Image (tube, rainbow, N blue to C red):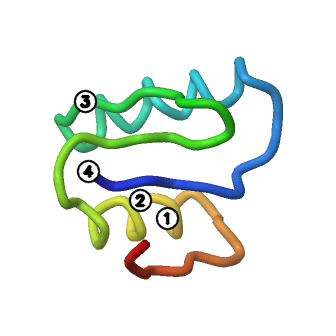
Amino acid sequence: MTCIAGLGGAEAEREALARELRKALGAGARVEGDELVVQGALVERVASWLEARGAQRVVRGNA
């Protein structure tokens, strides 16, 4: 599982990002509170996707 935190915005915006991630990565993605959770260890793919969408800061790490 890959977790994305610190996105901010309204829940509807996070839901829209989850839908976009599902399509772009071909993996399950859902909103859990303030985080997006992507099925699978897809850290690099998710980070690249976020950077391509203009994310100003992407931090990779283990919990």
Q: Position of residue 45 (x, y in %)?
A: 28, 64
Q: Looking at the image, which residue is at 30% across and 67% down?
A: 43
Q: Tell me the distance, in whole angstroms, between the alpha carbons under discs 3 and 2.
A: 15 Å
Q: Of the residues shown, which amino acid type is indicated by label 2?
A: Trp
Q: Tell me the distance, in whole angstroms, between the alpha carbons under discs 2 and 4.
A: 16 Å
Sequence-wise first label, 1 or 3: 3
Marker disc for residue 17: none
Q: Is residue 39 left or right of residue 9?
A: left
Marker disc for residue 28: 3
For the C terminus, the image quarter is bottom left
Q: Looking at the image, which residue is at 43% across and 31% down?
A: 20
Sequence-wise first label, 2 or 4: 4
Marker disc for residue 49: 2
Which residue is identified by label 1? 52
Circles 1 and 2, Cβ within 8 Å, touching? The answer is yes
Circles 3 and 2, Cβ within 8 Å, touching? The answer is no
Circles 1 and 3, Cβ within 8 Å, touching? The answer is no
Q: Looking at the image, which residue is at 81% across and 27% down?
A: 10
- Residue 14 in which image quadrant: top right
Q: Of the residues shown, which amino acid type is indicated by label 3?
A: Gly
Q: Tell me the distance, in whole angstroms, between the alpha carbons under discs 3 and 4.
A: 10 Å
Q: Is residue 1 left or right of residue 37?
A: left
Q: Tell me the distance, in whole angstroms, between the alpha carbons under discs 1 and 4.
A: 21 Å
> Considering the numbered disc 2 on the image, is that residue within a helix, a strand or a loop?
helix
Q: Tell me the distance, in whole angstroms, between the alpha carbons under discs 1 and 3.
A: 20 Å
Q: Residue furthest right?
A: 9
Q: Comparing marks 1 and 4, which lies closer to the viewer? A: 4
Q: Of the residues shown, which amino acid type is indicated by label 1?
A: Ala
Q: Comparing marks 1 and 3, which lies closer to the viewer? A: 3
